[in-house]
Image (tube, rainbow, N blue to C red):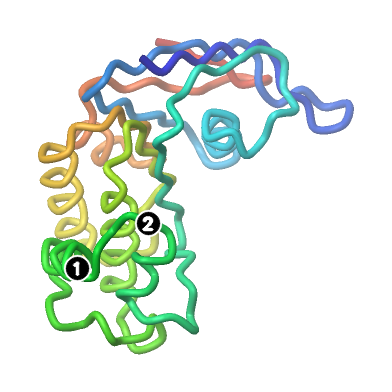
Amino acid sequence: MIRVDIRAKHFGPTQVLGTVRFDIAPGETVALVGPSGIGKSTVLRIVAGIDNRFEGNVTRPDAMAIVFQEPTLLPWRSARDNLLLTQPGLSRDGAERALTRVGLEGRGDAFPGHLSLGQQRRLSLARAFAGSPELLIMDEPFVSLDPDMADQMIGLSEALIAEHRPATLFVTHARSEADRLADRVLELSGTPASLTN
C-alpha cells in the first residue's frame, strides 16, 4: 500500500500545497488532475521521494519507476543500453523482449536521437516496466503528442499496466486521459492546493 499524507509544502514563504492525503492499493491506478501550475508535479516529486522538504510523510516501496513528461534518455547510449544501465538484473534477451513489447523490435542498437518522439516515449515505458516496479509514477507522459500518437501511447500504457499491475500514480491535466486510464480520479484545487475528492 502506498500511503500519502502531505500536510503542507512551501516554496519559501509561499504555501503551495495544503492537505493532500490518499492511498494507492497494489494494482490500482490513481489519476491526479487539476489545472496547470496547481501543484500536481510537486505532489508527484514528493511521492517519488525526489522532494523531501514538506510536512507529512509518504510510505512507498523501493521498487519504483518514473515516466517523466520528456523521455529523459541517455542520448549517448543505445536503446538497449538505456534499459540495461538502469536495470542491472536485466539480460540482453530480456531487454530485447522489453523493446519488442513496446513496438521497438530491431531498434536496440538505435540511439535516442535516431528515434522519433513517439519511439522515445515507448523506450521510456519499456525502461519503466523492465524493472517490474511495485509503484509506477507517470508525469503527463502523453503531453505534446498529436491525438493519434497520444491514443496509441495511452493504449500501450493501459496494456502494460494490466500485465504488470503496479500501483500507479498518473498525473495529467486532461480529464479524458484520467477517466480512461485510472480506477480513481483525484482533483487538486484551491490555494494552497488540496484534494477535493
Which amino acid type is shown beneath numbered disc 2? Gln
Residue under the image location 37 percent in, 81 percent down? 78
Return the residue nearer the eye: 144 or 154: 154
2 or 1: mark nearer the eye: 2
Location of the C terminus (image quadrant) = top left
Q: Residues within 10 Å of mark 1 (few under 14, many from 20)?
A: many
Circle 1 SS class: helix
Which amino acid type is shown beneath numbered disc 1? Leu
Circle 2 SS class: loop
In the displayed structure, 159 sits above or below 195; it is below
Count of labels in the image: 2
Q: Quadrant of residue 164?
A: top left
Return the residue nearer the eye: 25 or 34: 25
Q: Quadrant of residue 133?
A: top left
State the residue position of label 2: 87
Q: Mark 1 or mark 2, which is nearer the start of the sequence?
A: 2
Image position, residue 67 (x, y; %): 40, 51
Location of the N terminus (image quadrant) = top left
Image position, residue 165 (x, y; %): 18, 32
Q: CA distance from mark 2 to mark 1?
A: 14 Å
State the residue position of label 1: 99
The numbered mark at residue 48 is: none
In the displayed structure, 7 sits above or below 129; it is above
Residue under the image location 20 percent in, 36 percent down? 181
Residue under the image location 32 percent in, 76 percent down? 79
Image position, residue 56 (x, y; %): 66, 12
Q: Quadrant of residue 13?
A: top right
Return the residue nearer the eye: 50 or 179: 50
